[in-house]
Amino acid sequence: MQNVVCARDALGANMKDKRHLDELALKWSDVDTNDLIRSGILNNLQPHPNLKQLIINGYPGITFPDWIGDPLFSNLVSVYLYWCGNCSSLPMFGQLPSLKHLSIKGMKGVERVGSEFYEDASSSITSKPSFPFLQTLRFEHMYNWKKWLCCGCEFRRLRELYLIRCPKLTGKLPEELPSLKKLEIEGCWGLLVASLQVPAIRELKMLGFGELQLKRQASGFAALQTSDIEILNVCQWKQLPLEPHRLTIRGLHAVESLLEEGILQTHTSPMQDLKIWGCYFSRPLNRFGFPMVTLKSLQIYKCGNVGFLLPELFRCHHPSLEDLKIISSKTDLSLSSSFSLAIFPRLIHFDIDSVDGLESLSISISEGEPTSLRSLEIINCDDLEYIELPALNSACYKILECGKLKSLALALSSLQRLSLEGCPQLLFHNDGLPSDLRELEIFKCNQLKPQVDWGLQRLASLTEFIIGGCQNVESFPEELLLPSSLTTLEMKYFPNLKSLDGRGLQQLTSLTKLSIRHCPKLQFIPREGFQHFPSLMELEIEDCPGLQSFGEDILRHLSSLERLSIRQCHALQSLTGSGLQYLTSLEKLDISLCSKLQSLKEAGLPSLASLKQLHIGEFHELQSLTEVGLQQLTSLEKLFIFNCPKLQSLTRERLPDSLSCLDILSCPLLEQRCQFEEGQEWDYIAHIPKIFIGFEAF
């Protein structure tokens, strides 16, 4: 609009006659024209009354023309006024009969919103109710707005009200908003919300304003049961809605006074979700004054001096609490917490994450006391040295990145899942591990060097064992270390592992999955032990760059194997005599990132009658697959070949009809030969339903 410098030019646009125009957006940047010309330009751009949406952005004049807000615009539904900083008053929007959405932003010249906003004060005709259908009203960045005068009969259908960054606004809001469902106030430091009737309120978010006092009519009782309330940096508390469903409290310095007052306790409509974020406790809490009978979820996040909160929290009974999280908080004093799970009979998830100052945690439960705990996570507690936990049936414990943790005591025998990671000083308690343990993961716990003294052999129910990050282990597993009940064994990040102990492996007769990853010094895999894996279904070997051979004597006994993955074994030069022909049940084969592997000719792929998926990739020296016999894989459904820069040929015969997807990526020479209808090998692959060559699909 800054390019229109003459009001006559604007008149030439003939906007009044454009009856099919639904939306009009007018935007100015910096201009030098005088106010009379500016006003004339906007006045002459008056659109047809059929207009439904109007946007005015950056208008530089000091007054708006009369047509803006004229009730003759009976179809106008949405109006947006942005950054019209020179205007000192708002148009009369209150009599627009169809207006539903009104947004006003950045009008720094407006200090007062009064009767002119609602009706024409100079008219002798009795006006209709103001804003009869308005649903959304938003004021933003009104930096000089001081007073909002209301007559009390407007906004009967308003559903959402936003007041954002109006720092000088004082006084009260409209008192009766019977349809309001969402109220958001931010950065209105002088505003008083008093005696506000909001029977339909569902969401309330307040950040940085003065005094809060909300009331609810009895008729709004049912609607308020699902209200979502967020209070931030509120200076004074008097009264809140009686039935919030979810409440978030942020940024209060002495939050303990609020928690003790119990202003939200109710026996009629329960609050179920409470979040305390970024608050500070200045003294010990005397009582916990929230509705503990109904509370299901409690989250304490980035709070200071939580040591003043936790003793009272762990003293009270929380009969309905299901989810408890204490995250990124700290205490200025050393803290030892001890409590019985009996106070949390329905607690399912309990997370303690990054709580500085917590040195000791003891959780107990007596025989016969009810508990529902299924998940306990203790993470990044840098000062924690001692943990005592009840070993609960069906519970999963995860203790991660607790650098000073030295002792873990598990009181009972029924724990089934335990994960320990990043606890370099941890030693097991003299009582050992729970006898009913089914899943155990130990990673980066340097003091926990795997040894027979752990007593894993006696864990008759242990089916999954994941271990890694052991710096000083050269051979694994030691004979008699692992129980025969294991079905899954994963070994990862053994930087000094040189060999696998066949005597320790041969006991694992129930094993169905074996994973060996990130063992750079491992050179050979012994045939001893693999002879005793009749049920092995999945074998994964990844990032073992020193592995030189993978022989027939390993695979010939694995007739049940369904998935085989060999990746990042850079010293592996050949699969000749690998024994793939014995894998009659194999359905998925992944051979990739073996940079020295030059040929798959002798691998025996044609014998894999059950193979459905084949992944071949990152073979920098591989030149041809024509002698592999891909056309003989009559069960093959998906073939993925990637990053083989020297690969030139795929096949000399039609690929099997079973193939439903062929994907070739970053193989420039082969991609050229497989081009749609033109490549030398296109006829061999044209029948495949899904073909991806490079980044093109055919």
Image: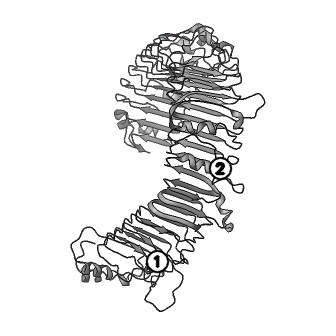
Q: Is residue 195 above or below residue 341?
A: below
Front residue of 567 and 673: 567
* Mark 2 element type: loop
Give, as a single range, the part of the protein colored magenta. 475-482
Q: Residue type at mark 1?
A: Leu
Give the total of numbered labels: 2
User: Which residue matches tag 1?
Assistant: 76
Percent of width and height locating residue 441: 58, 23
- Considering the whole magenta stretch, tell me its main secondary structure: loop
Instruction: Give left or right: position of 573 versus 509.
Output: left
Label 2: which residue?
Answer: 272
Q: Nearer the viewer, residue 289 or 532?
A: 289
Give the residue drawn at x 70%, y 17%: 460
Image quadrant in which you'd find residue 387: top right
Dot in front, 1 or 2? 2
Q: Locate residue 268: give its quadrant.
A: bottom right
